Amino acid sequence: MERPSVPAMDELDAVLRDIEEMEEAIRVLKERVSQIPGEMSEQLGSDEARIAAARYLYWMTPDVPTQAIGYGLCGLGRNKLVELIGAAQVNIPCNRCKRPLLVRNRTHMLEITNAIKRGGRRFGRGYTFLCDACQKAMIEERYAWHQQIQQAQSERLRQLKTMPYAEYLASEEWKARRKRHLRSVGYRCQVCNTQGVVLDVHHRTYQRRGEEHYTDLLALCRTCHDLFHREGRLVK
């Protein structure tokens, strides 16, 4: 291809070279950022001072890599460093208890920052920010609520299985299940395929009464249903 011979092309080449040089300069500076904590360690006079400096760099200078802070200042890996310097309190209240949040680590801080930018909810009941204690309490409350729901459902299922059959057929649960089955078969008799007639939903088995599967039920027109009860079998 022929290079365009115009002044704008010369300017473009110069700009691209400047970008390349700036990117190289940034790379060199980032390497330097990672080296400085190690030099700070030599200049600080005590372990307490190094820990205090590590805490400051970790929380206040997010562009300094955690690894550079940990190994450079304290000779520690990421997890040990975070454990050593501890959580930080920020001026953001927990939506539930209204106490200032404790930020566990940089990842946690990033989650909070992103939530602020989005302005959206991160938890149920409209909560955006929850401290660890409130988050744990809410999880426990949800679990207790879920257990109550399960117990209530189990008790209702026991009632459906043991109530008189005529009473079961009048229950809201059976009415909903019957309607769903008729809809699934297109309101047709599953034996003669007749449509537009009164249909009964017949139980092929009562083992799962209250929680019937599709195959437990059969939609029958009155003719096929009567034939079944008379013959004791389905005739196709």
Image (tube, rainbow, N blue to C red):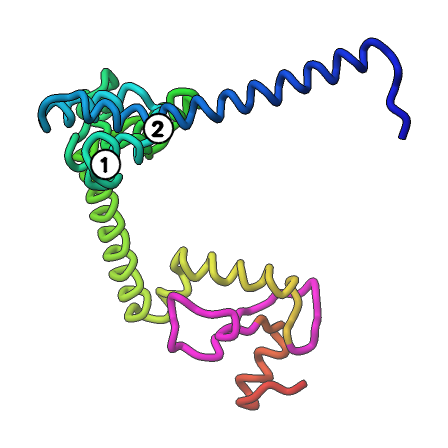
Name the residue rendered at 62%, 65% in the picture. Answer: 185
The spot of residue 234 in percent (x, y) is: 60, 85
Name the residue rendered at 23%, 32% in the picture. Answer: 104
Q: What is the three-letter code of the residue carrying label 1?
A: Gln
- Residue 208 appears in view: yes
Quick one: quadrant of the N terminus?
top right
Residue 200 within the magenta-colored segment of the rendering: yes
Question: Quick check: 199 above or below 29?
Answer: below
Question: Quick check: 222 above or below 42?
Answer: below
Q: Which residue is mark 1?
A: 135
Disc assigned to residue 218: none
Which one is nearer the viewer's eye here, 93 or 44? 44
Snapshot quadrant of residue 94: top left
Q: What is the three-letter code of the residue carrying label 2?
A: Ser
Which one is nearer the viewer's eye here, 128 or 115? 115
Q: Secondary structure at mark 2?
A: helix
Q: Which residue is mark 2?
A: 34
The numbered mark, 2 or 1, whose residue comes first in the sequence reads 2
The spot of residue 35 in percent (x, y) is: 33, 27
Image mark count: 2
Name the residue rendered at 40%, 58% in the picture. Answer: 173
The spot of residue 78 in percent (x, y) is: 26, 39
Most frequent secondary structure within the magenta stretch: loop
Q: Which residues are magenta?
A: 191-218
86 left or right of 4?
Answer: left
Q: Residues within 10 Å of mark 2 (few under 14, many from 20)?
A: some
Residue 212 within the magenta-colored segment of the rendering: yes
Snapshot quadrant of residue 212: bottom left
